[in-house]
Image: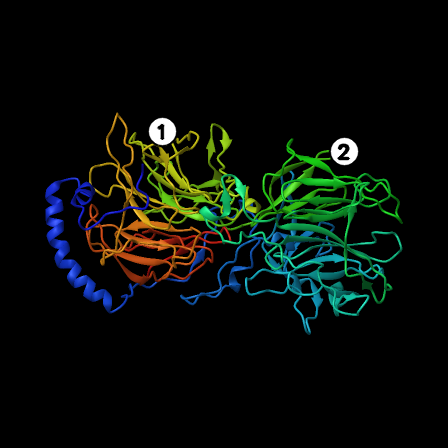
Amino acid sequence: MNDWNGGMRESDPLKLIQLCSRPYQYVLWSLARIIFLVLAGTLCEAGEREITGTFATPRLLYAADAKEPGPMLTCPLVPETHWDGSRPTYMPWGILMSLASVFDVNQDGMRDIVMRTDVYLHTGRYRGDVPIFGQPRRLSEFMDYDEPTARLSPRYKERWHGSHTFSDLNGDDEIDIVTGSKEEPFRWWKGIGRGKNKRRVFKYQGTLVEASGGQALEPLLKSNCAPTINVVDWDGDGLSDLIVGVRLVYYASPLKYKPLGGYGWDEVFAGKTWLGGDPLGILVFHKNVGTRDKPKFTVGTALRIGDDQRLAMFYANASPAVVDFDGDGVLDIIACTNERLVLYRNSGTRMEPHLAHGVAIKIDGKRDLPYQGLSLVLANWKKGDSHHLLLGSAQFAYHAQNIGTPGKPEYSIRGPVLQDNAPLLVDAFAMPHVCDWNGDGKPDLLVGCEKGFITFFENCSTATPPGLDFRRGKQLTVNGKTLRHVSKFSQSGPDEGLLGYANPIAVDWDGDGDLDILSGFAEPILKFFENTGTRTSPRLAPGRKITVDGEALPHDQRSRPIAKDWNGDGLPDLVAVTKDGYLRYFERRSKDGGWPLKPGVLMRDVKGKSLYLRGGEGRRGGRVKLTAVDWDKDGDFDLIVGSRDGKPNPGYWENHGTNCAPVFEVRGKFPVPIVTRHFNLVEPYDWDGDGDLDVISSSDSGGLFYIEQK
């Protein structure tokens, strides 16, 4: 049985000998270590010593061919970001597409995308059915609006934004703007006509009003996301009402989604049973009981569906679009629940709507959506389009083409909407690894992401040495199908049951001369994807779990390991954080024609203490990103460790031993600007050929950042 909680003790020389490929190395190491521990232990009492180094401002990477459109960047514009080297404004996590509005901003007959106060103008071009948009510009370039006491797109401490919709709220045939958020009341800006150069002009009117008490109207339930807002005359009385989707109700509510014992692999599941509660999504009707000029709304009631009039409540997500889907003159509702797209037909009348039981709409022939928790907005880009949808993910926004009929609805996701000269992106939580994947002598990028894909960015540079010139990304495949790993048993619960958090590294794991892939994922496993192709034409087999003595290695969740030859025997060994948060060394050995891993041995610092790399010992999540590099150029592997709550983060751990018997000392924070929040992955490589190591950094936003060492 594997000794996951054991480790190397000072009194156990056999384990030390196993670390070294030759016994005499152990003898020399023992003598050196006695001297070193005395000196280093005294030195450590004085506190951490900072590593020196100067890095340039992070630069977001773009494709080499600026004419080749790529997936749209939905996070705020890069110039908003200020780097100060300590805790700068990072490129924030996505989940922003719930904030998208589709509206013809420049009045050219084609609908554009508005996010926050950024606008992406429709170019009129398509790749297949997928529209292509321009670079983001400021909404204030095209219309005038005042912000006397409130911002049109409020920002919060987590740097999430509010939502908005462009609709006629007061029935005067002028477009108004209604905004909402997870923390503030609904507000509105009244359209008051055209100004200079026929620009639309909007005047702030304050918060919408709740009718019974005259208070500011807020979402019916507090939630973790901005609401999806529809301004429609739901009951045919000539006044505009609100149909609102409230999403992810649990963080700010009494709902006990989080298990009472907190997050952690041994706390959240009993076998396959989730120990927490349910997050909630709900469709809410706020009836307008005021007048056109002075709208007032009810506090909100859940919509009813079916003959039994059950509440329109769903697991985790409810993002609606209101439309007469079947052309019968009454309004229906399409709702994006956590895992399905559902049509609720109105079997009532225009004045007395009655929603029938929902019918799941097939997506690419399947009943379930490929991703969870998507937001939804109608996206008829031009005249003649019929009920196309924009599905918002954590970073990408997917165009869903209506390929059905009013009697038999069906959609097909054609791909993420595209943007001219977009940055290199993956769909949130970019995990970059530098390697020559296709064997052409140039450093490429393999990048994991939140959705569980691994994307290959091929280096197409013609410079010497090759520079940062990359083609648009291509998702890796297994047996002709896109490689995607999803984790039904994420430690964050079933709300994240379609996420994968791929953390890939490339290594010749089976010794056949080509590069294979090892990857951590959202659950405590590590997978090996064998390259059954060639060095220059890789082809991946399905992933297999890495095992130790027949049991799956319990790799820490959402983490990245190291695969290098630590003991000089020619075989790549494994250094990884296991699910208890401790760093372990797994040596390869030759046995029965293969190279299985020996049981893990705890790795230690200069005081002999086991290395716990999550930060505080109470941290039960993973997200530990490991990098081994000879940073100080003394011939051995040092560690750069990034994590969610590690201190320092990312930290530099200098190796004062040897590769076969390493002993680490924390030297302080690795001095790169932080471009992420959930984790810090530092991938060193000498990109400019000047002899020092530069950095490619991870990011929550899905973007890839180059940070030059000066």
- Pick the residue in front: 282 or 162: 282
Where is the N terminus found, in terms of image quarters?
top left
Q: Between 502 and 535, which is closer to the camera in this rendering?
A: 502
The disc labelled 1 sits on which kind of residue?
Thr
Q: Position of residue 49 (x, y in %)?
A: 27, 66
Residue extending furthest top? 592
**Residue 460 appears in the picture as rendered:** no
Task: Please name the residue that numbered disc 2 is placed on.
Answer: 405
Residue that label 1 marks: 534
Crowd around label 2: few <14 · some 14–19 · many ≥20 (10 Å): few
Query: Of the residues under marks 2 and 1, which one precedes in the sequence?
Result: 2
Q: What element carries label 1?
A: loop
Q: Is residue 296 above or below residue 703?
A: below
Taking 707 as reference, is 147 left or right? right
Q: Which of marks 2 and 1 is in front?
A: 2
The three-letter code of the residue at mark 2 reads: Thr
Q: Residue at x 65, y 34 (%)?
A: 367
How packed is label 1: few (under 14 Cα within 10 Å), some, or many (20 or more)? some
- Residue 428: tell me if it is visible: yes
